[in-house]
Image (cartoon, rainbow, N blue to C red):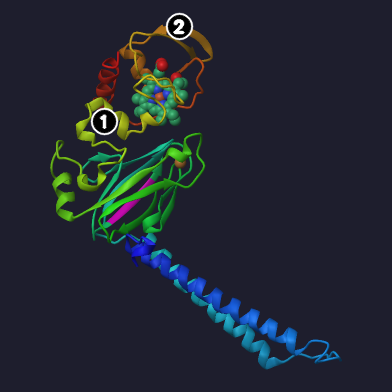
Amino acid sequence: MDWMNQAAISAQKSDAVFFYVFGLSVVFLIFITTLMIYFVVRYSKKRHPRAEQIEGHVGLEIVWTAIPLVLFLSIFYYGWTNYEYMRLAPRDAMAIKVTARQWSWSFEYPNGKQSKVLFAPIGKPMKMEVRSADMVHGFFIPSFRLKIDAVPARTNTTWFQATKVGSYDIECTVICGVDHSLMLSKVIVVPEDEFKAWYFGGENAPEPGKSFRANEAHPDLKDLPKGMAVLTVKGCLACHSVDGKPKVGPTLKALYGKEQQVFVGGVAKTITVDDAYLRRSIIDPMGQVVRGYPPAMPKTQLTDQELNEVVRFIKTLN
Ligand SMILES: [Cu+2]
């Protein structure tokens, strides 16, 4: 049904369960209310001046135990089988590593490609292996009715098969700090050819979904300087600006060569920002903490090459 914005099979299944429970509730609401009004009228003091005591009725007891039991079991069965459907990915699903961190999402594909938004071919099963780099987050795609927690030190899995080309929101459902409400991304569902062209297209293949992504705040990684692409995909920009604006962490603009006051093991020191300092700040964020900022920077896995690109890029911001 189009007005409900169902964009995956999981959405159809989840909505079917919802409407089953909702429908039952409506039927019983009407049934009970009607009966109640009928009794109020039928047994009012005027029509029925002398109250009667009624002693048990085995037949009734059985009926009003058995019917709700069957109904509740049907709700359980229907809910359970659909929950199972959402948790058990088919074997041929493409497995995507989903990483949640304060305050961004990133996605890694089986061939090592990474992205800030999730690209998915229409009609193909996509398995989400959801992890967290810091604390509990919630991975939620409303249009797919898909939601699963991202918990440190474990991998939770779910999957989907998209049914409609388009761009759909990804949200975080767990209050995870000051910029929780900005922890947003998109699923970009495209025809399979377009997905393959990007997936197999090497480093310079344009990201899919150009036609309907024009107004989105997620730049094509290949159009960014390499170091900027790393900062983007690794979620650094949630806390660091590159234009001088303060965020949770210090801006990276004009950082190189600056005199910086830091605490090393609680002792205040003044250092000059050079390559070695930048590397240490990124590899071991707690090792030296910039004065006036909380020790809030998470450890992020970067390859040597990514680290080099980042350091090179920070130098270009002077
Ligand atoms: Cu979060």
Badge 1: residue crowd in 10 Å (few <14, some 14–19, many ≥20): many
Q: What amino acid is at disc 1? A: Ala
Residue at position x 72%, y 86% from top? 39
**In front of the other: 254 or 128:** 254
Quarter of the view holding residue 259 = top left
Q: Is residue 310 magenta?
A: no
Image side of residue 46 versus residue 246, left or right: right
Query: Which residue position holds label 1?
Result: 229
Residue 160 x, y percent position in the rendering: 32, 58
Residue 266 x, y percent position in the rendering: 54, 14
Query: Which residue position holds label 2?
Result: 270
Image side of residue 171 versus residue 228, left or right: right
Residue 106 x, y percent position in the rendering: 33, 40
Which is the main secondary structure of the residues drawn in magenta? strand
Element class at badge 1? helix
Q: Is residue 34 above or below residue 176?
A: below
Magenta stretch, residue numbers: 126-130
**In front of the other: 257 or 208:** 208
The quarter in which the N terminus is drawn is: bottom left
The quarter in which the C terminus is drawn is: top left
Q: Is residue 129 magenta?
A: yes
Q: Is residue 75 above or below residue 256?
A: below
Q: Is residue 137 above or below residue 260?
A: below
Q: What amino acid is at disc 2? A: Thr
**In front of the other: 46 or 300:** 46
Badge 2: residue crowd in 10 Å (few <14, some 14–19, many ≥20): few
Q: CA distance from mark 1 to mark 2?
A: 30 Å
Residue 310 x, y percent position in the rendering: 28, 23
Mark nearest the camera among 1 and 2 is 1
